[in-house]
Amino acid sequence: MLAFELLKTDGRARRGRLTLNHGVVETPVFMPVGTYGTVKGVMPSALEVMGAEIILGNTFHLWMRPGLDVLGKFGGLHRFENWRRPILTDSGGFQVWSLGEMRKISEEGVRFASPVNGDKLFLTPEVSMQIQTVLNSDVVMQFDECTPYETKGEVTSERDARTSMELSLRWARRSRDEFARLGNPNALFGIVQGGMYESLREASLASLVELDLAGYAIGGVSVGEPKDEMLRIMAHTPHRLPERKPRYLMGVGTPEDLVEGVAQGVDMFDCVMPTRNARNGHLFTRFGDLRLRNARFRDDERPIDESCRCPTCAGFSRAYLHHLDRCGEMLGPMLNSIHNLHFYVNLMREIRAALDEDRFEGWRTQFRADRARGV
Amino acid sequence: MLAFELLKTDGRARRGRLTLNHGVVETPVFMPVGTYGTVKGVMPSALEVMGAEIILGNTFHLWMRPGLDVLGKFGGLHRFENWRRPILTDSGGFQVWSLGEMRKISEEGVRFASPVNGDKLFLTPEVSMQIQTVLNSDVVMQFDECTPYETKGEVTSERDARTSMELSLRWARRSRDEFARLGNPNALFGIVQGGMYESLREASLASLVELDLAGYAIGGVSVGEPKDEMLRIMAHTPHRLPERKPRYLMGVGTPEDLVEGVAQGVDMFDCVMPTRNARNGHLFTRFGDLRLRNARFRDDERPIDESCRCPTCAGFSRAYLHHLDRCGEMLGPMLNSIHNLHFYVNLMREIRAALDEDRFEGWRTQFRADRARGV
């Protein structure tokens, strides 16, 4: 129920096509994040119009609310949230890990108290696969432990990173077995861990490849490490993953990070940055970023980005968006979110066109020059 | 620059057509409220799709933010908020009056401190006309004093109501003179005051009619009085207004109030109820109102209203909207606001069709039966 075609390469950069149960996804692709079954402040129809081909859902959050009985009654997440195209769900591992003192990790899984109602819960690779099967997401992520960048104020040691990575590997096998037992018709992706240690990344990767999963993700980046550390792992791991499988860099990042990721061989990205920043009046443009709260936009009749084709830029000025932000009006985050998501989705569309036409390096040079120009 | 055609009557109920500088408005009409230059949580395009023909703006709020320099630069409110159809603006009188202890009313006007930055400001009939001329709203309201239902804990006396009404009359004349002096090309409406006293309402009305204004509003209702008092004034005043001028009942009300208003000869309504209630999960349906927070909607796969043709009911279930509300997701108020506004706009569309086809009384009987059925 999954095919990945590698259409073209340019150095490490790849142009591909992913066929999933709910549709086809052209790669490289950016996936908007819809934690609770909604991309915050954006109608599903607006996501379709901007050309979003796949969105995320968060297994942990959806398990808490609305709960599996409700999602089961709707036959999964698609009908519930009125989204017809593919969905990728994470495993819940990152969220329970983020609970900090609230959870206890063992070989079996993670025990924690529900942050919604205090219920004692136990999330394991098997439970994660069961939940994701109810969600009927097109891409299912293995249950993993995210290796932190720092442990007790120190950079996580190689020894600790190895222990964590090996646990994730055992959970990968249990995820694969449960996914198969459930007869889940979708695609299961493994997650390469190993922290900031190349040798551990390689060991994780080699063991995951033996499991012959449908795709592979790089986890444990964008978890608080310095930028150069992230770039080091981004340069190391993606191109070592199997050529004929899709590669997904989790939780990254800025527009520049996405372009760098593509250049390093990544096919899929997700990040809350476009929507979260939109709500804070931080807007992305071809010519650099724009802080809407700046008083100089108070009477600026221009759109956010004169080269942008999104509905926000087609109809509304910087002055109006500045005004909405100042008044705390809901239409502000709505219009800003559409613009920022359109910027990310369109960035990937431009990259795909450049790869199709064998001009990715030229495009990348122009992208850097444009972004440096300033708004 | 204004024409009002009376197309048909049925008892006191009227079917009309209002031609304004930015377009034609079929009456009876409901006007969504866009206080700060945005109908809260709703895209202008969504208002157009649902068939909203005219929206409100609040002079006082827009004067405070973004300010007249910005609105002047945009040539008025239409381009600023990206709304092409007609706009009605209030005079600011009700808002400064609502500041309570913060303001001081004299013959000349109202002195107050800006709630935004503390600046000392003075709003007069002349200033209100000047602001509304910059806004370039299609319908301009006279500056008036709203007579409160209660004064110092007692129902406002006839003596106090008369004093207030007479001040509003003098302000009506000053509004008319300044409106003419400015060469404002739009339509100026007068506002009948007089509190809960029929004789004062009649005196106010008679004096305003002498000014031969483009239309007439009934103010000072829906200001805290008991429902039967409101219905008494609604039954008294509208049909006494000039037959060939549009009649506007300010700030009213529930769906039942609108139907009653039409039956009493009102042509135009505005109210924050559909949008405000939407944000609180209070939804209007043909079969009565629905409180989204009720746990019985947790897994309800039906739309809000099975007879409704709005985009919310076309794509989303009660269970999903209940979930969005519970999670505090912005998409909840967005979808709820579209539904409630569509309900109000469509209610007036149904009333107009019933009037066109000489079946308003039958429609009204069915409306009451349907609303009493329960969701």
Image: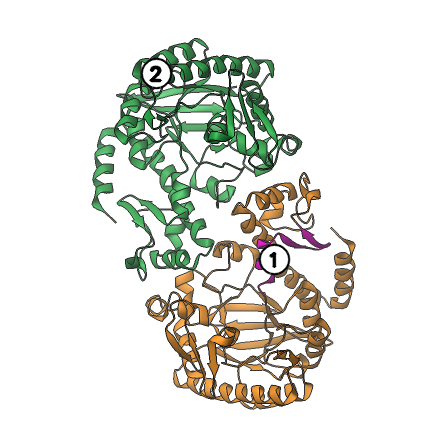
Chain colours: A orange, B green
Residue found 35% across the figure and 30% down from its top: B222
| Front residue of this view, candidates A10 and A213 | A213
The reply to whether residue A184 is visible in this rendering is no
A203 to the left or right of A181:
right
Residue found 56% across the figure and 91% down from its top: A210
Look at the image and give the residue range highlighted in magenta.
A271-291
Q: Residue furthest front?
A: B152
Q: Is residue B35 above or below residue B295?
A: above
Q: Is residue B231 above or below residue B301?
A: above
Percent across and percent down for residue A269 are 60, 69
| Front residue of this view, candidates B4 and A201 | A201
Residue found 53% across the figure and 77% down from its top: A3
Residue tagged 1: A277
Are dots 2 and 1 in contact, CB under 8 Å?
no
Residue A287 inside the magenta-drawn segment: yes
The reply to whether residue B143 is visible in this rendering is yes
Residue found 46% across the figure and 84% down from its top: A175
Percent across and percent down for residue A255 are 67, 63
Q: Secondary structure at mark 1?
A: helix
Disc 1 residue type (three-letter): Asn
Residue tagged 2: B201
